[in-house]
Image (spheres, rainbow, N blue to C red):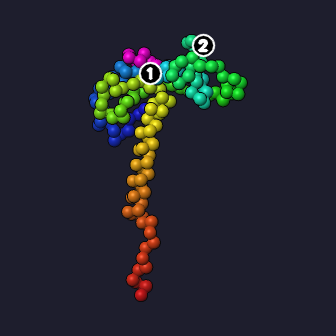
Protein backbone atom coordinates (compact mmCIF):
# COMPACT_ATOMS: atom_id res chain seq x y z
CA UNK A 1 0.00 0.00 0.00
CA UNK A 2 1.32 3.45 -0.76
CA UNK A 3 2.45 5.50 2.21
CA UNK A 4 0.46 8.69 2.69
CA UNK A 5 2.59 11.84 2.51
CA UNK A 6 1.89 12.87 6.11
CA UNK A 7 3.12 9.49 7.41
CA UNK A 8 6.33 9.31 5.32
CA UNK A 9 8.52 10.90 8.03
CA UNK A 10 7.54 8.05 10.41
CA UNK A 11 9.19 5.43 8.19
CA UNK A 12 12.97 4.83 8.20
CA UNK A 13 15.08 5.82 5.19
CA UNK A 14 15.73 2.14 4.39
CA UNK A 15 12.02 1.22 4.37
CA UNK A 16 12.05 -0.11 0.79
CA UNK A 17 14.87 -2.55 1.56
CA UNK A 18 13.27 -3.60 4.86
CA UNK A 19 9.90 -4.14 3.19
CA UNK A 20 11.50 -6.18 0.39
CA UNK A 21 13.32 -8.34 2.95
CA UNK A 22 10.07 -9.09 4.77
CA UNK A 23 8.04 -9.76 1.62
CA UNK A 24 10.50 -11.64 -0.57
CA UNK A 25 13.22 -13.11 1.66
CA UNK A 26 11.35 -14.12 4.78
CA UNK A 27 7.91 -14.76 3.23
CA UNK A 28 9.32 -16.00 -0.12
CA UNK A 29 6.85 -13.89 -2.09
CA UNK A 30 3.71 -15.28 -0.43
CA UNK A 31 1.21 -13.81 2.01
CA UNK A 32 2.14 -14.99 5.50
CA UNK A 33 -1.53 -15.44 6.42
CA UNK A 34 -3.33 -16.94 3.41
CA UNK A 35 -0.41 -18.03 1.22
CA UNK A 36 -1.38 -16.13 -1.94
CA UNK A 37 1.61 -15.53 -4.23
CA UNK A 38 2.79 -12.01 -5.07
CA UNK A 39 2.15 -10.53 -8.55
CA UNK A 40 -0.20 -13.31 -9.72
CA UNK A 41 -3.71 -13.26 -11.07
CA UNK A 42 -5.90 -15.62 -9.05
CA UNK A 43 -9.45 -16.88 -9.23
CA UNK A 44 -11.18 -16.03 -5.96
CA UNK A 45 -14.59 -16.77 -4.50
CA UNK A 46 -16.56 -14.26 -2.38
CA UNK A 47 -15.96 -16.31 0.79
CA UNK A 48 -12.15 -15.99 0.42
CA UNK A 49 -11.30 -19.32 -1.19
CA UNK A 50 -8.78 -19.07 -4.02
CA UNK A 51 -7.43 -21.37 -6.71
CA UNK A 52 -3.82 -22.44 -6.11
CA UNK A 53 -2.42 -23.27 -9.51
CA UNK A 54 0.79 -24.81 -8.13
CA UNK A 55 -1.00 -27.49 -6.09
CA UNK A 56 -4.11 -27.57 -8.34
CA UNK A 57 -6.53 -27.15 -5.43
CA UNK A 58 -8.77 -24.57 -3.78
CA UNK A 59 -7.43 -22.98 -0.59
CA UNK A 60 -9.18 -21.12 2.22
CA UNK A 61 -8.16 -17.86 3.93
CA UNK A 62 -5.57 -19.70 6.04
CA UNK A 63 -3.84 -21.50 3.17
CA UNK A 64 -5.45 -24.87 3.95
CA UNK A 65 -7.03 -27.03 1.25
CA UNK A 66 -10.71 -26.13 0.95
CA UNK A 67 -13.73 -27.78 -0.59
CA UNK A 68 -14.32 -27.30 -4.27
CA UNK A 69 -17.04 -24.79 -5.19
CA UNK A 70 -20.35 -25.90 -6.62
CA UNK A 71 -21.64 -24.46 -9.87
CA UNK A 72 -23.31 -21.36 -8.39
CA UNK A 73 -20.26 -20.55 -6.26
CA UNK A 74 -17.95 -20.98 -9.25
CA UNK A 75 -20.12 -18.58 -11.26
CA UNK A 76 -19.49 -15.92 -8.60
CA UNK A 77 -15.70 -16.24 -8.88
CA UNK A 78 -13.62 -13.27 -9.95
CA UNK A 79 -10.03 -12.66 -10.91
CA UNK A 80 -7.80 -10.53 -8.70
CA UNK A 81 -4.19 -9.40 -8.88
CA UNK A 82 -2.27 -10.06 -5.66
CA UNK A 83 0.14 -7.47 -4.28
CA UNK A 84 2.09 -8.07 -1.07
CA UNK A 85 2.68 -5.30 1.44
CA UNK A 86 4.68 -5.17 4.65
CA UNK A 87 2.09 -4.64 7.41
CA UNK A 88 2.78 -3.35 10.92
CA UNK A 89 1.05 -5.71 13.35
CA UNK A 90 0.66 -3.04 16.04
CA UNK A 91 -0.34 -0.30 13.53
CA UNK A 92 2.66 1.85 14.54
CA UNK A 93 4.79 2.79 11.49
CA UNK A 94 7.68 3.75 13.79
CA UNK A 95 7.98 0.18 15.13
CA UNK A 96 9.99 -1.52 12.39
CA UNK A 97 11.21 -4.60 14.23
CA UNK A 98 11.04 -7.70 12.04
CA UNK A 99 8.74 -9.46 14.49
CA UNK A 100 6.26 -6.56 14.13
CA UNK A 101 6.20 -6.79 10.31
CA UNK A 102 4.29 -9.33 8.20
CA UNK A 103 4.00 -9.80 4.47
CA UNK A 104 0.26 -9.65 3.77
CA UNK A 105 -1.75 -9.57 0.57
CA UNK A 106 -4.20 -6.70 0.17
CA UNK A 107 -7.15 -8.83 1.38
CA UNK A 108 -5.41 -9.96 4.58
CA UNK A 109 -3.94 -6.49 5.18
CA UNK A 110 -7.39 -4.88 5.04
CA UNK A 111 -8.82 -7.58 7.31
CA UNK A 112 -5.97 -7.03 9.80
CA UNK A 113 -6.52 -3.25 9.80
CA UNK A 114 -10.34 -3.41 9.89
CA UNK A 115 -10.79 -2.42 13.56
CA UNK A 116 -8.11 0.27 13.29
CA UNK A 117 -9.77 1.76 10.17
CA UNK A 118 -13.18 1.67 11.87
CA UNK A 119 -11.81 3.61 14.85
CA UNK A 120 -10.10 6.12 12.56
CA UNK A 121 -13.32 6.60 10.58
CA UNK A 122 -15.23 7.27 13.82
CA UNK A 123 -12.64 9.85 14.95
CA UNK A 124 -12.72 11.58 11.56
CA UNK A 125 -16.52 11.70 11.61
CA UNK A 126 -16.58 13.17 15.13
CA UNK A 127 -13.87 15.74 14.29
CA UNK A 128 -15.73 16.90 11.17
CA UNK A 129 -18.96 17.06 13.10
CA UNK A 130 -17.30 19.21 15.77
CA UNK A 131 -15.81 21.51 13.14
CA UNK A 132 -19.22 21.85 11.54
CA UNK A 133 -20.70 22.80 14.91
CA UNK A 134 -17.92 25.31 15.49
CA UNK A 135 -17.92 27.04 12.11
CA UNK A 136 -21.28 26.33 10.51
CA UNK A 137 -23.35 26.24 13.66
CA UNK A 138 -26.15 23.69 13.81
CA UNK A 139 -28.26 26.23 15.68
CA UNK A 140 -30.46 28.98 14.30
CA UNK A 141 -28.83 32.38 14.47
CA UNK A 142 -30.55 34.83 16.80
CA UNK A 143 -32.42 37.63 15.06
CA UNK A 144 -30.16 40.59 14.42
CA UNK A 145 -30.70 43.89 16.15
CA UNK A 146 -30.57 45.71 12.79
CA UNK A 147 -34.25 44.94 12.11
CA UNK A 148 -35.40 46.99 15.16
Q: Whole-percent x and y of residue 65? A: 57, 17
Q: Whole-percent x and y of residue 27? A: 41, 18
Residue 29 is inside the magenta segment: yes
**Residue at 41%, 49% in the rendered image:** 124
**Badge 1, how many Cα within 10 Å: few under 14, some, many 20+?**
many
The number of discs equals 2
Q: Is residue 113 left or right of residue 13?
A: right
- As helix, strand or loop, the secondary structure at mark 2 comes to loop
- As helix, strand or loop, the secondary structure at mark 1 comes to loop
Look at the image and give the residue range highlighted in magenta.
Answer: 24-32
The image quadrant of residue 42 is top right
Residue 134 is inside the magenta segment: no
Residue 69 appears in the picture as rendered: yes
Residue 39 appears in the picture as rendered: no
Numbered badge on residue 32: 1
Q: Is residue 38 above or below residue 121?
A: above
Q: Whole-percent x and y of residue 113? A: 43, 35
Q: Is residue 140 above or below residue 22?
A: below
Numbered badge on residue 56: 2
Q: Is residue 33 left or right of residue 65?
A: left
Distance from disc 2 to disc 1, alpha carbons, whole Å, reads: 20 Å
Numbered badge on residue 122: none
Farthest right residue? Answer: 71
Amino acid sequence: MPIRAEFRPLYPPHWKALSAEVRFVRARGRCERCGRPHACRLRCLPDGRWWDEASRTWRDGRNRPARWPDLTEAAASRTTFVVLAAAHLNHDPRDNRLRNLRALCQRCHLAHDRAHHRAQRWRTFRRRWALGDLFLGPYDLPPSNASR
